[in-house]
Amino acid sequence: MVRLSVNVNKVATIRNSRGGEVPSVLEAVEVCVAAGAPGITLHPREDGRHIRPDDVYAIAEALEPVRDRVEYNIEGDPRPGLVEMVERVRPDQCTLVPVRSGEVTSEAGWRPDTPKGPLREIIERFHEAGVRVSVFVDPEPSPIEWVAELGADRVELYTEPYARAFEQGGGALESCLEHYEAACRRAHELGLGLNAGHDLDLGNLPTFVKLPHIDEVSIGHALISRALFIGLGEVVSEYLRITSR
């Protein structure tokens, strides 16, 4: 079984476009949990354009009674404010994601020539706080090996290239799947757990979860977009029917 972690950033984006507290991010989390989602993901960016610090703390409090069955994952770049937040909240997992100036959403994983020292220190701090650490990378051997040297627990494979290959189908998809399978096997050989996320949806997820050693998928944009038409709880159930196969 692959765990589903629902990213609720888009609910916060809609809320912030108007101001106030509607739609409620906290209520969205409650609906996801009631529908059986085994994970909730937030990505609080420094500019606060969707998830805000108060969301992080409020959701931590709301999830506390169900933390035995629902994992809390906080994503973000390792800036001081986020590091302090993670140490205070102590989620089940923190996913370290690089941020590029002007990006709308994540565009690539960490480069393997990034200096290891600062990230290694942060990972050690998170481990001391009891937080599992995943690092967002492209599906290539060199960044996966770099993550293993950092002492992290997992990698999260950036899956937009897979989503584009799935749209093309045929040889492009076959080649891409071989590429991702090799990345999965290399991570597993190095003792790393495997997460994945970005542009996964109901159409391409059933094929992706057949890859070996996948522990978790994080899905937000496609899931929340479909929920506008048929309801959030129902869409979570649709995704769970795929990940629980």
Image: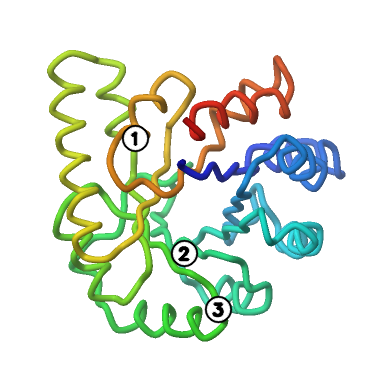
The quadrant holding residue 18 is: top right
The image position of residue 65, as x and y in percent, is 80, 61
Q: Position of residue 44 (x, y in %)?
A: 61, 57
For this view, does 29 lie left or right of residue 185? right
Tell me what residue is drawn at x 30 percent, y 25 percent.
164
Mark earlier in primary sequence (1, 3): 3
The kind of residue tagged 1 is Glu
> How many C-alpha atoms fall within 10 Å of the one at disc 1: few (<14), some, or many (≥20)?
some
- Can you tell which mark lies on residue 77? 2
Which residue, given by chain and number where applicable, does mark 1 sit on?
Answer: 160
Q: In the rendering, which numbered label is found on residue 130?
A: 3
Q: Nearer the viewer, residue 26 or 194?
A: 194
Instruction: Specify which label sits upstream in the sequence, 1 or 2.
Output: 2
Q: Give how far apart the Cα atoms at labels 3 and 2 are.
A: 19 Å
Q: Are marks 1 and 2 in contact (CB under 8 Å)?
A: no
Mark 1–mark 2 Cα distance, whole angstroms, equals: 19 Å
- What kind of element bears circle 3? loop
Q: Nearer the viewer, mark 1 or mark 3?
A: 3
Secondary structure category for the residue under label 1: helix
Position of residue 185 relative to residue 204, above or below, is below
Percent of width and height locating residue 120: 34, 81
The kind of residue tagged 3 is: Gly
Q: What is the three-letter code of the residue carrying label 2? A: Asp
